[in-house]
Amino acid sequence: MTQGNRTKKLSRNSTPEHDPSATPSTITSTTSEPTKTPTPPSTPQSRKQKRKGIIPPPLFELPPPNDASSALSSPTTVTTPPPQMASGTRLLVCSIGNPAPYLNTLHSAGHTVLNVLRESLSYPSFQKSRAHGNGLLSTGTYFTLWQSPTLMNVSGPAVSAAWKQFVRENKQMGYGEEGCGLVVVHDELELRVGEVKVRKGDASPKGHNGLKSIRDTLRGQLYTRIGVGIGRPESRDAGVVADYVLRKMSVEERRKISVSAGRVMEELMKLSDQ
């Protein structure tokens, strides 16, 4: 499969801005030389982004939706994984955040991304699973998606329970634990809104209490973290930061975080192919 087939296609509600009067009309020419279409210049990543392994936001902006309810009406069109991935690493993809009434806050960006992935992959609706730590479960051909039911700061026990059940079920189907992988999707203050970065699970949680809880519960279990950027306030005061992550997403923030699901999908495909 070429890299192009893996790249997400973004649905847009309008075409890029242009001058209608500039649209070329049919012109009779005395020459047969074909018209050359100029190639738009690419925007390279900064050295800092390359060094940190940050996947930048799209090079163009989607038009903002009219209201918050339509923010996901035209989400990322996620490329369906190729059939051969079914024989690769079987992934449990977990999102951590907060339950209602904090579902649509910046701290729950991971849940937003998993909702977009589920819809784009046409997976079944999320259903509560007592066996999987009382989390919300959606099982598809390629991945098992799971949303934590707990408050962010105590995510670890539920993630651990879901992982153990996932491994148990796969062993019953003839897959060893070495053929299973755990991925945690979470919000990331150190990235701009919509940026995506992949780290190993044993990397520093950098003050993220949800990741600290998972680290303390899994106790050395290998897993992968996918951080979804939510930006950060100028102040480093703990109270200001807490208010920031617990506020509702703006329409524009929700749109950018939803678009990042395409990049998250690309990383999941790489992990499943290992």
Image: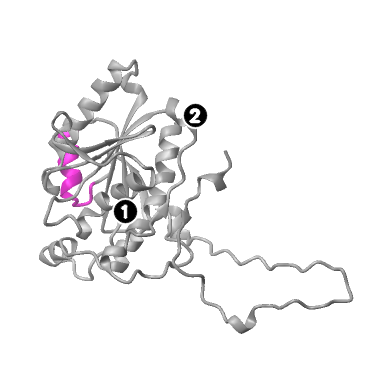
Which is more toward the observer, 154 or 201? 154
Query: Which amino acid lies under the numbered mark 1 shown in the image of this protein?
Result: Val
Taking the magenta stretch, the answer to whether it contains residue 216 is: yes
| Dominant secondary structure, magenta | helix
Q: Is residue 160 left or right of residue 35?
A: left
Q: CA distance from mark 1 to mark 2?
A: 27 Å
Q: Residue at x 45, y 59 (%)?
A: 11
Instruction: List the single residue furthest toward the bottom.
Output: 21
| Front disc: 1 or 2 | 2
Question: Can you identify the residue that label 1 sits on?
Answer: 228
- Mark 1 or mark 2: name the one nearer the start of the chain: 2
Taking the magenta stretch, the answer to whether it contains residue 234 is: no
Percent coordinates x, y for residue 259 in the rendering: 38, 57
Write the start and end of the magenta stretch as one range. Answer: 205-218
Q: Residues within 10 Å of mark 2 (few under 14, many from 20)?
A: few
Q: Are marks 1 and 2 in contact (CB under 8 Å)?
A: no
